[in-house]
């Protein structure tokens, strides 16, 4: 397993495509920011799909850690990740 944080910067009218795709795998924690644990296979699939979705002047940054235990996460205010636990 691998822990990732994904941040994207795309045209405003295209954000829904990235939002809908990434929600299938990760937790939406802020505008254009997702995080979560993935299998290596899912990480590769996401990488290829995101690359194919990008247009000129758009970007995606993936921060990858070998495990969530190596991440110190501090939230000030309400934590959007907690909402996803209660569907």
Image (cartoon, grey):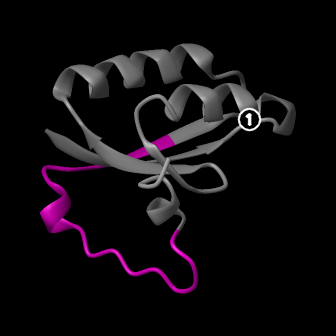
Residue 74 versus residue 54 in the image, above or below: below
Q: Is residue 75 magenta-colored?
A: yes
- Using the rendered image of the protein, determine whether residue 5 is visible from the camera's viewpoint: no
Choose between 45 and 24: the one closer to the eye: 24
- Residue reaching furthest to the right: 13
In percent of width and height, residue 49 lies at 48, 16
- Residue reaching furthest to the front: 87
In percent of width and height, residue 29 lies at 53, 58
- Using the rendered image of the protein, determine whether residue 82 is visible from the camera's viewpoint: yes
Can you say which quadrant of the picture contains the N terminus? top left
The residue at the point 21 percent across, 20 percent down is 41
In percent of width and height, residue 8 lies at 59, 43
Judge left or right: residue 63 versus residue 65. Answer: right
Judge left or right: residue 67 versus residue 82. Answer: left
- What residue would you read off at disc 1? 15
The residue at the point 69 percent across, 25 percent down is 17
Residue 49 versus residue 31 in the image, above or below: above
Residue 4 versus residue 21 in the image, above or below: below
In percent of width and height, residue 7 lies at 53, 48
Judge left or right: residue 71 versus residue 28. Answer: left
Looking at the rendered structure, the secondary structure element under dot 1 is helix
The residue at the point 18 percent across, 27 percent down is 40
Magenta residues? 61-79
Q: Residues within 10 Å of mark 1 (few under 14, many from 20)?
A: some
Total residue callouts? 1
């Amino acid at each position: 397993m691998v822990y990732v944080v994904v941040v994207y910067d795309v045209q405003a009218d295209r954000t829904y495509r990235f939002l809908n795709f990434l929600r299938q795998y990760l937790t939406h924690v802020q505008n254009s920011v997702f995080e979560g644990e993935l299998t290596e296979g899912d990480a590769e699939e996401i990488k290829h799909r995101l690359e194919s979705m990008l247009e000129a002047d758009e970007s995606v940054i993936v921060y990858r850690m070998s495990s969530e235990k190596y991440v110190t996460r501090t939230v000030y205010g309400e934590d959007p990740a907690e909402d996803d636990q209660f569907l």
